[in-house]
Amino acid sequence: MKILNRYIFKQVFIGFLLVSVSLLAMLWLTQSLRFVEMVTRQGLPVYLFAEMTSLLMPRVFNILSPIAVFVAVLFVYNRMISDRELVAMQSAGISPWQNAKGAMFLGILLAIFNVYVMNWGIPQSEERFRDLEWQVKNNLTHLMFREGEFTDMKNGITVFIDKHENDGSVSGIFVNDESNPDIKVTLTAEKGRLIKTDKGPRILFVNGVRQEVNTKTFKFNTLTFSRYSAEFNSGGGYRKKDATAREKNLFELLNSASDSSLDARSVRKNIVEGHRRLIEPLYNLVYALLACVGLVVGLFNRRGQFKIISMEVLCMIIISGGDLALTNLAGRSLYFLPLLYVNCLLPLLICLYLLLFYNPFYFNAHRTKRNIGHEI
């Protein structure tokens, strides 16, 4: 890589880091608000909160990286024009293709990195995130009951813990079970411990009393026990959720038609997701070239490059909107699937053609010569 290309690449890369980190921080903050209630009301540990929110970042980065590289390249090349750096390079005979190599190198590196993120990073993070989310909502061993507070569960169970012991047990435990509308059960015990079994979470009571009231017959039963075990969650079991399209690998997605457990809609969704994993990384290169092609190919304007920048931003919006629209159409009918590749590759080919074969100085000189001929 030449000194000039290294200089441009460094400027663009620093700009990309600043933009991407800023956008990731803002989106991390908005996404983390979904789990604030789990921390404040359900006592979710902070380390688990941090892990769950961080698992969302690969998906967010994959969405933001093309936009971040577009903004960074557009800003750096526009600044180089304002500082007359790009004008001096063009005057020295450096071609638009050479001037665009710094942005192109960054786009290629991000495309390669996003291939890894989409095909390995996102499936693993999605699987881990969904597993943690389900366990936090359904598995009581992942909930931290606060001392001296009543905790209401979604299945009609209320739990009160007096104190957490160092060995993991609890003392002064009270449980009110109204999951069955016909029978209300109240359990009190000196000590208790949450245990995990193959059939689901259970609670072990030590030295307590079980009281049961039938709301229809008003029959009251009481039982004094030294040890008592009861199901804590009526949902039952640890059934694993079926893997979503984001959790599957590329081979599974592209061969979803052979999976008899999927319906026609799910098959189309999986196939589209598989092809998007091949297409989306290329948008880093497309947006990098799109942001710089107008500035390195277009003629210098002392009044600024507002028109060129506006056209590039408009083209970026059209390409992004086309990608979203075609993805939805391909999810309904796979006949639209080739248009996803056209929407990505056509702008890439146009940008490469302009950088390699379009000479603005030649066309400008030809136009000036023609105007002079008309005047004569």
Image (cartoon, grey):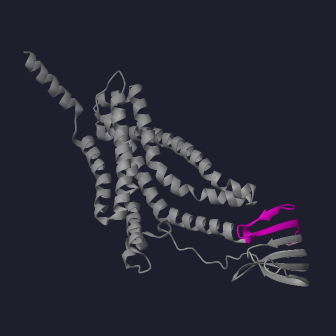
In the displayed structure, would residue 227 be above or below residue 252?
below
Asked where in the image residue 166 lies, by quadrant, the reply is bottom right
Residue interval drawn in magenta: 140-167
Look at the image and tell me in which quarter the C terminus lies.
top left
Q: Position of residue 72 (x, y in %)?
A: 45, 39
Q: Is 132 or 111 nearer to us in this picture?
A: 132
Q: Is residue 300 left or right of residue 17?
A: left
* Image coords of residue 311 (percent x, y): 33, 36
Name which residue lies at 42% across and 70% down.
266
| Residue 103 point in image, percent of width and height | 39, 43
> Which residue occupies the extreme top position in the image?
376
Location of the N terminus by quadrant is: top left
Q: Is residue 144 visible?
A: no
From where the camera sits, is residue 365 visible?
A: yes
Nearest to the observer: residue 170 or residue 114: 170
**Residue at left offset 70%, top offset 55%:** 37
Q: Is 72 drawn above or below residue 345 in the view shown?
A: above
Is residue 214 shown above or below 16?
Answer: below
Residue 166 part of the magenta segment: yes
Q: Quadrant of residue 4?
A: top left
**Residue drawn 52% across the image and 72% down it:** 243
91 horizontally vs 128: left or right: left
| 105 in magenta | no
User: With 49 as the anchor, is 253 left or right in this view?
Assistant: left
Horizontal side, residue 192 vs residue 260: left or right:
right
The total of numbered circles placed on residues is 0
**Residue at the front extreme?**
217
Q: Position of residue 264 (x, y in %)?
A: 38, 73
**Residue at image x 86%, y 76%?**
187
